[in-house]
Image (spheres, rainbow, N blue to C red):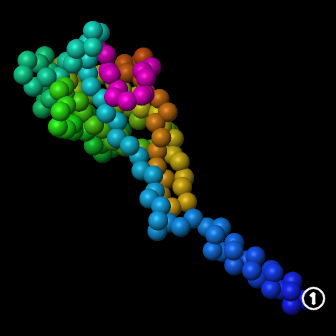
Amino acid sequence: MNFKIILLGSAFLVQIILFGCENCDTADPMVTSYITLKVVDSAGKNLVNSFNGPNYPDSVRASVKDKSAIQFEILERPGLTETQFICMPSFNETGQTELYLHLNHQDTDTLLINYKPVEQDCGGAYYVYTGFSFNGKRISNEGVLELVK
């Protein structure tokens, strides 16, 4: 009788060990996605344009309030007919990054980015964006962010 209990218990433990854990070799961890954005007027016309301005893509810069590193660059993709940018902000424990968008040397706007960390079994934490505000006004966070001037 004891032999059967030990055998069943051992079989149960083997199942837990083999099937109860995540297999990190076959599952790719989630990663934080880039923010894609464009600057438009109230009619939806892109205000950053290589051919006729009024702002030119290579003059647009981004910085953050705490002077930490940020990735910000022109999005180049076949078939893209308007100027868009991709951005990966610096993340901190406050869950908020204040990004300054410098369209030229006289025009600076503020994009407030809210996020939260998500822990995962395989790989490190990644971040999910929870909200955006442009110059104090909440904006939709679905797809390409339209920053309306």
Q: Which residue is mark 1?
A: 1
Confirm whether residue 67 shows in the render: no
Q: Which one is in front, 74 or 112?
A: 74
Residue 140 covered by magenta stretch = yes
Mark 1: few/some/many CA within 10 Å (<14, 14-19, 20+): few
Q: Viewed as shown, does residue 7 lie left or right of 29? A: right
- Residue, far right: 1
Residue situated furthest top in the rendering: 43
Q: Residue placed farthest to the left in the image?
A: 51
Q: Residue at x 53, y 48 (%)?
A: 118
Is 28 on the left or on the right of 22, as rendered? left
Secondary element at image label 1: loop
Segment colored magenta: 138-149
Q: Residue at x 27, y 37 (%)?
A: 86
* Residue 28 in view (yes/no): yes
Q: Is residue 15 magenta?
A: no
**86, above or below 10, in the image:** above
Residue 134 falls in which quadrant of the image? top left
What residue appears at the point 41 percent right and 46 percent down from the top-left corner? 32
- Decide if residue 142 is on the left or right side of residue 109: right
Left or right: 21 as drawn, with respect to 147: right
The percent position of residue 25, horizontal first and vertical second, equals 46, 68
Q: Amino acid at mark 1?
A: Met
Quarter assignment of residue 28? bottom left
Q: Position of residue 81 (x, y in %)?
A: 17, 26
